[in-house]
Amino acid sequence: MDKITVQVANESHYIYAQAVCDLIEESAKQRGTGIAKRKPEYVREKMETNKAIIALDGEELIGFCYIETWDHGKYVANSGLIVNPKYRKQGMARRIKKLAFDHARNKYPKAKVFGITTSGTVMGINSDLGYRPVIFAKLTQDEAFWKGCQSCPNYDILERNERSKCLCTGMLAPSKEEEEAMKFDLTDKIINKSAGE
């Protein structure tokens, strides 16, 4: 575990693209729920544009997560979080997700961060990062995002409910700019209250 790195992926990580895709597919089968299937070309594009996080133990793939933007940058999602079964229950998902969250917010400071998941572990990590459960209407309505759900075995549930609900839980965090404005407002209120006493 002393050779573990969690970092923003780049072109040097192309060699892991197929392994990432295999791990995504394997994870979806094990859970019996949906993780959108991805092709190596898609994963490489995320690496090339610095929109992915990769975790390695030396040269062994531990985990992966990627960033997508929607609605012309109004929303950003950390998607496809996976961890090699050998490395689960060691805090790796949390480390990968935290870096993906921070990287997405720094790269797109005006964008709200959202995700949909069926994983209780991911919901817990998201809550710790500041996400809150929301109805699907509060998430991006970008058709391309919802089209990505088509490879999920539960897609018929989503369609039947006109994209209002599914087995996934929608979660949303404020943009970096919104969070900074909220902190500023709170500090301002505390200062004004103290000055008035």
Image (cartoon, grey):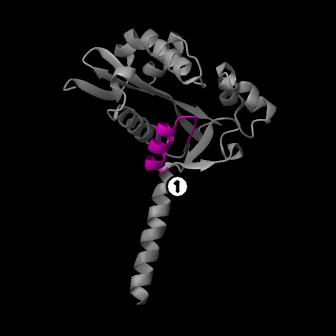
Give the position of the C terminus as an image quadrant: bottom left
Q: List x then y, in percent, for residue 23.
A: 46, 16
Asked if residue 57 is positioned above or below residue 98 in the image, the reply reads above
Q: Could you tell me which residue is drawn at 75 percent across and 40 percent down?
A: 164
Under mark 1, the amino acid is Glu
Q: List x then y, in percent, for residue 32.
A: 59, 22
Q: Could you tell me which residue is drawn at 48 percent across and 51 percent down?
A: 130
Mark 1, other Cα within 10 Å: few <14 / some 14–19 / many ≥20? some
Most extreme residue toward the bottom is 197
Whether residue 179 is visible, yes or no, is yes
Give the position of the N terminus as an image quadrant: top left
Most extreme residue toward the left is 2
Whether residue 44 is visible, yes or no, is no
Q: Secondary structure at mark 1?
A: helix
The residue carrying mark 1 is: 178
Magenta segment includes 117: yes
Q: Could you tell me which residue is drawn at 71 percent across and 45 percent down?
A: 137
Q: Could you tell me which residue is drawn at 39 percent across and 12 percent down?
A: 16
Q: How many marks?
A: 1
Asked if residue 103 is positioned above or below residue 185 in the image, the reply reads above
**Closer-to-camera residue (25/142):** 25
Asked if residue 183 is positioned above or below residue 29 in the image, the reply reads below
**Closer-to-camera residue (163/167):** 167
Q: List x then y, in percent, for residue 24.
A: 50, 19
The region drawn magenta spans 114-130
Q: List x then y, in percent, for residue 59.
A: 28, 14
Asked if residue 189 is positioned above or below residue 196 in the image, the reply reads above
Magenta segment includes 27: no
| Residue 98 placement, left or right of 142 | left
